[in-house]
Amino acid sequence: MTFPRSAPTLNDVAQAAGVSTATVSRCLNTPERVIDSTRERVMKAVQELGYTPNFGARVMAARRTNTIGAIIPTMENAVFARGLQAFQEGLRESGFTLLVASSSYRSDIEEEQIRALIARGADGLLLIGHDRDPAILDYLQAQNIPVLVAWSFDPGAPLPSVGFDNRRSMQALADTVIGMGHRRIGVISAMTRGNDRARLRLAGIRDAVALAGLGEDAVTVIETTYAIETGAEAFETLMTSDSPPTAVMCGNDVLAVGAMKKARELSLDVPRDVSVTGFDDIELASLVDPALTTVHVPHREMGRRAARALVEMVDHGRSVPSEELAAHVRMRGSVAPPGRDTGAKA
Amino acid sequence: MTFPRSAPTLNDVAQAAGVSTATVSRCLNTPERVIDSTRERVMKAVQELGYTPNFGARVMAARRTNTIGAIIPTMENAVFARGLQAFQEGLRESGFTLLVASSSYRSDIEEEQIRALIARGADGLLLIGHDRDPAILDYLQAQNIPVLVAWSFDPGAPLPSVGFDNRRSMQALADTVIGMGHRRIGVISAMTRGNDRARLRLAGIRDAVALAGLGEDAVTVIETTYAIETGAEAFETLMTSDSPPTAVMCGNDVLAVGAMKKARELSLDVPRDVSVTGFDDIELASLVDPALTTVHVPHREMGRRAARALVEMVDHGRSVPSEELAAHVRMRGSVAPPGRDTGAKA
DNA sequence: GCTAACAATGTAAGCGCTTACATTGCGTGA
DNA sequence: TCACGCAATGTAAGCGCTTACATTGTTAGC
């Protein structure tokens, strides 16, 4: 079996139906402008030949693709998957098709994907987070393509966004942790380079620490890549240090679950021996034992709103104000006041 | 801010650089055929104008997109996400871009997405599972596009596949469960309609039951959609029946985790009161307590191999033999022999 | 019966690009 | 010095489609 690649064209259909290409095109795009009998004949030919309009040609002639592109850091993070699913459903309702690409958290790949999507005629783009090389911003500007940022709300950023305040949300969580009496806080953060969500969450923790009048050395930060295993390793490093923290705040739920897993291995009881927090509130967070205290992010809602906003931008060619969604602290079993031995190693 | 949509064209670049469009095109596609000085001038113009080739036009002229399309049932299932990530990485190495669309497990949407991807000039397609309307198969045939199926191995199916034997793998797991003495087995299956993986896994269980000489009424099946919650509900229905099963086999890990969650709520100890099994071996499986006995599927490997196979098909225009990957039973703590009270309700 | 008005369809230009082929300009060997 | 060959570049024909405009065929009103 070989693949000579010779799909039927408009012309083939026209010939089969004994009409001109214009008529076939009209059958497909403005059927009411073609008389019934002709239309039936044409549609029959379309069916029989298994004709699909060539997208490239169509785009070139009609200047519109009804396609939205999205570039996410990775498909493996449930958080993006969920929001994106809602985003896609929202787009479908408005007649748009979603094309997804992933950047593996690398800005060079992201840029490549942006170009690929634009080249494919995306009418609009959804990007994650605001951290981005200014050169790409210029490029986007030159392309004159509507771009929306999600997962991060920042009204001052160059691109409009639909998201939540990562910094403030994390600060709220840290306030709670500190309010319970924790004075030595370990932080397991995602890599902050090129990732404003991670950076802002970390900043939120520092805000809380400063607000509580604690010294900067109250927090010990480890940056690591996104995975349960790396979270576990970082946790071990933190807990086996000379002065282990009484609370470990993680940049996301996946890292937190890794931390809790390692705690079990180290026979450390959560939250008696050490408190653990996450961020995102993915399903996993309420499945682990004890359930994870985290920040709930309305991913689905964010996806839906992003779809609405981007469609608006594309359809009416105008920008749209940034939208902030609320992200709330979800107190669960993994956090408690520290034990009495707040000074020495356990 | 508005979006007049008027990106620079090849022609603009040519004018800016003072050369012909052909030379610009050559700079971009076969740079070694252009003298250095000219190339520099052209590239400078490209930079300054922020030029991106129009994909539609390029495809139409070159008849090749270097794009592979994949349609998965849902992005929310980690299992697909993981395999797809590997698939994409494999494609990237060969210079292909991956475009992903999801069908929400609906064949009508899948068909729509297939058309969308083909229309966009996908050079090849990755589909999940073999269950598919023959009409789409004909259409695919007519389009003459290489199509590969993943997640399901079936050398007899019309499309080549890279996957594992869902039926035999599940049978192996069921053999083990039955071998431990279970005689009343509850099954929580994903919806089997249009989903050969679910159907074959169920068939595998029935194979094991038949092989063990048990009657068909040894198994009670509930079909439900894919979610932790639905798994929990199905589990409750099963366990509150007149004659509850001593083992509940689930079509995938997510349903199984839902079942275990509900078991905890019902104060049923796993595996003492009831054994639970999953399928896929996602990370979650080893995080729950007790760890879940399941079937390990090499998702990443599958993604990599699928990429290699599809690139082969596209590049050399020839079909490729189906590849079978091994999926092994992973015994963990959620399965044990049944208690003594195998007859009456607990 | 004739023509105006309109509906149905056909004709053909052009969307932005690649590439076969034509042209130009240079270095080389006799 | 000149013809030749070859490398660098230009010219122009499509790729499959949409759509403005032209043509044809009906119908209605006189």
Image: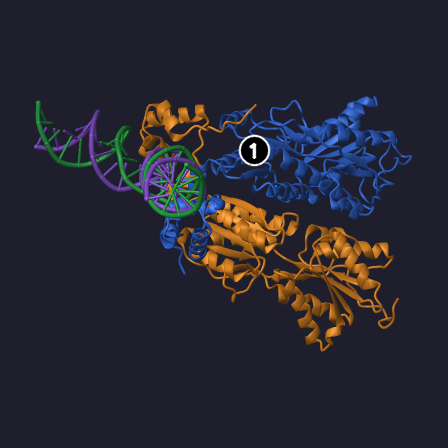
Chain colours: A orange, B blue, C green, D purple
Of A119 and B11, nearer the camera is B11
Let me know if residue B93 appears in the view: yes
Q: Residues within 10 Å of mark 1 (few under 14, many from 20)?
A: some
Please state, as top left, top right, bottom left or bottom right, where the N terminus of chain A lies in the image: top right
Residue A178 position, x and y percent, is 74, 71
Residue B182 location, quadrant = top right
Q: Residue at x 45, y 37 (%)?
A: B62
Question: Considering only vertical position in the picture, is B306 above or below A258?
Answer: above
Left/right of residue B276 with respect to residue A328 in the rendered view: right
- Under mark 1, the amino acid is Asp
Chain letter for mark 1: B
Left/right of residue A209 with respect to residue A266 in the rendered view: left
Q: Residue at x 85, y 54 (%)?
A: A265
Left/right of residue B89 with respect to residue A6 in the rendered view: right
Residue B25 position, x and y percent, is 43, 45
Let me know if residue A291 appears in the view: no
Of D9 and B26, nearer the camera is D9
Dot 1 corresponds to which residue?
A: B315
Residue A274 position, x and y percent, is 81, 63
Residue A184 location, quadrant = bottom right
Question: Considering only vertical position in the picture, is B268 above or below B143?
Answer: below
Residue sticking out furthest to the right: B340
Left/right of residue B175 with respect to residue A152 in the rendered view: right
Residue B268 location, quadrant = top right
Residue B118 position, x and y percent, is 50, 35
Element type at marker 1? helix
Please state, as top left, top right, bottom left or bottom right, where the C terminus of chain A lies in the image: bottom right
